[in-house]
Amino acid sequence: MTTDARLVLTAFAQAARTAHPALTALDQLSGDGDFGDNLREGLDRVVSALEDRPAEPPLAVAAAVFLDEVGGTSGPLIGLLFQELARAHSAHPQDDHEAWRTGVAEGLAAIRRVGEAEPGDRTLVDTLAPARDALDAGAGPRGVAEAAL
């Protein structure tokens, strides 16, 4: 059974709306405070785009929205993650674990390459690296979520 990416993206959008105040407050401590806005608004745009483009692969839609429409540093970087997740899901349509494992690993590599961030820099890399490691170790979604905490 494969994960329904539309459901994942919709749940992610809801989680971003819920976490918006905390994300904004945390980003204000070390940045310009726009991360919560960019993530929430970007994911809301993704959900809307998914309704308008039902035949397109959901992760490809998310990549396009974040790469083309979401500002700040996080927009293009999250767009790269979605782009790699879309590629991996296209390459491994029947192997959900491999699709997520490959997509997260390649997305992390792209973000590190473009953003020049390393673990410990208090960036998205600090969340994706443990998720990649958990997927490499064979963890399922619960293990990945726990690793990301």
Image (cartoon, helix red, strand yellow):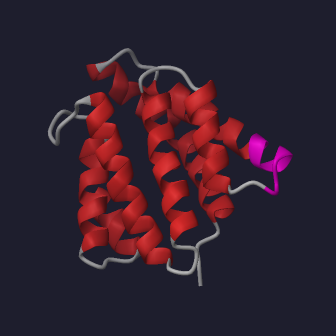
At 45% across and 27% down in the image, what residue appears? 35
Question: Residue 17 location in percent, x, y?
Answer: 59, 40
Q: How many marks?
A: 0
User: Is 112 rendered above or below residue 59?
Assistant: above
User: Which part of the image, by quadrant, shows the N terminus?
Assistant: bottom right
User: Is 85 rendered above or below residue 43?
Assistant: below
Residue at the far front in the pictured view: 91
Q: The magenta stretch spans which residues?
A: 48-55
Q: For residue 54: magenta?
A: yes
Residue at the far top in the pictured view: 32
Hey, which quadrant is residue 32 in on the image? top left
**Left or right, 116 with reference to 63:** left
Q: For residue 68: magenta?
A: no
At 57% across and 34% down in the image, what residue appears? 66
The answer, for residue 149, to whether it is visible in the render is: no
Q: Nearer the viewer, residue 49 or 15?
A: 49
Question: Residue 59 location in percent, x, y?
Answer: 60, 53
**Left or right, 18 with reference to 142:** right
